[in-house]
Image (tube, rainbow, N blue to C red):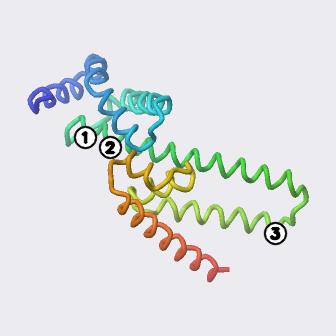
C-alpha cells in the first residue's frame, strides 16, 4: 500500500471511524494475521486473535490518537494481543497444573500452598518483565513445547538467536529466583 493511500485511510479512520472501519479491516486484516502467525503458527488461533485486535480497534475508534501509520499501530496491537494470548495460555496451564497437584495430594499444608502460590506469582511477574522477544521465545519453548529450530522458523530468526534469547531468559529468571529466596 502506498504511503499516500495509507495516510488517506488513517485520516478517514480518524475523522469518521465507523464509516472507514470496513476498509481498514479489509486493507489490514492479512497484515495483522501475518504478524500473529509469525509468533503462534496456529491458523485457528491467528484468526481469533486478529478478530480481537479489530474488535478492540473498533471499540476504541472514537478515542484513538494514532501518530504513526495505521499499519504500524495494528501490528503493535497484534503483537501485544499475541503476547497476552501466550501469557493467558500459560496461566491456564498453571491453573491446570495446580488442580492436578490438588487431586494428587488432597491435603497439602496450607503454608506450602501459600508459598507455592507466592512463588508462582513471583515467577509469572519475572517472566512478564523479560524483554518482548525474549518472553515470546521463552513462552514458545517452555509453554508451547517448541524446539529451537521450530521457534527459529516460526519467528524467522536464526537458531543461535533462539539459543541466546533462552540463555538470557534463564539467567534473568534464575537471578529473580535467587532474589526471591533472599526475601524469604
Q: Circles 3 and 2: CB distance less than 8 Å?
A: no
Secondary structure, mark 1, is: helix
Tell me what residue is drawn at x 31 percent, y 23 percent.
25
Q: Quadrant of the N terminus?
A: top left
Residues at circles 2 and 1 in contact by the CB criterion of under 8 Å? yes
Instruction: Count neighbours of disc 2 (C-alpha within 10 A) and say few if under 14, some if 14 to 19, many if 20 or more.
Output: some
Residue that mark 3 sits on:
111
Q: Quadrant of the C terminus?
A: bottom right
Give the side of residue 43 with respect to residue 18, left or right: right
**Residue lying at 51% horizontally and 46% vertically, measured from the top left:** 86
> Looking at the picture, how far across and down is residue 126, in whole percent?
52, 65
Q: Residues within 10 Å of mark 1 (few under 14, many from 20)?
A: some
Apparent side of residue 30 relative to residue 166 in the rendered image (left or right): left
Name which of mark 3 and mark 2 comes first in the sequence: 2
The numbered dot on residue 76 is 2
Secondary structure of residue under mark 3? helix
In primary-sequence order, the first of circles 3 and 1 is 1
| Label 3 – label 2 distance at C-alpha | 42 Å
- Residue 108, picture quadrant: bottom right
The image shows residue 19, relative to residue 83, as above or below, that is above
Q: Nearer the viewer, residue 56 or 109?
A: 109
Task: Measure the C-alpha gap from mark 2 to mark 1.
Answer: 6 Å
Residue 12 relative to residue 155: left or right = left
Q: Going by the image, does 156 lie left or right of 68?
A: right
Look at mark 1 in the image and give the residue it sits on. Answer: 72
Residue at the (44%, 38%) spot, across then down: 41
Mark 3 surroundings: few (<14), some (14-19) or many (≥20) residues within 10 A: few
**The residue positioned farthest toward the front in the image shown:** 149
Q: Which mark is residue 49?
A: none
Amino acid at each position: 500500500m502506498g504511503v499516500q493511500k495509507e495516510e488517506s485511510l488513517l485520516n478517514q479512520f480518524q475523522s469518521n471511524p465507523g464509516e472507514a472501519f470496513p476498509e481498514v479491516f479489509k486493507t489490514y486484516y492479512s497484515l495483522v494475521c501475518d504478524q500473529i502467525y509469525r509468533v503462534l503458527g496456529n491458523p485457528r488461533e491467528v484468526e481469533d486473535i486478529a478478530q480481537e485486535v479489530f474488535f478492540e480497534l473498533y471499540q476504541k475508534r472514537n478515542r484513538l490518537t494514532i501518530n504513526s501509520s495505521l499499519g504500524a499501530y495494528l501490528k503493535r496491537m497484534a503483537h501485544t494481543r499475541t503476547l497476552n494470548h501466550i501469557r493467558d495460555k500459560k496461566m491456564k496451564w498453571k491453573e491446570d497444573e495446580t488442580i492436578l497437584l490438588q487431586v494428587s495430594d488432597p491435603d497439602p499444608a496450607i503454608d506450602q500452598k501459600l508459598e507455592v502460590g507466592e512463588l508462582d506469582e513471583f515467577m509469572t511477574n519475572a517472566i512478564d518483565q523479560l524483554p518482548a522477544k525474549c518472553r515470546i521465545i521463552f513462552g514458545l519453548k517452555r509453554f508451547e513445547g517448541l524446539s529451537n529450530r521450530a521457534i527459529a522458523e516460526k519467528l524467522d530468526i536464526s537458531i543461535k538467536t533462539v539459543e541466546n534469547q533462552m540463555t538470557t531468559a534463564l539467567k534473568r529468571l534464575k537471578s529473580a529466583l535467587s532474589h526471591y529466596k533472599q526475601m524469604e
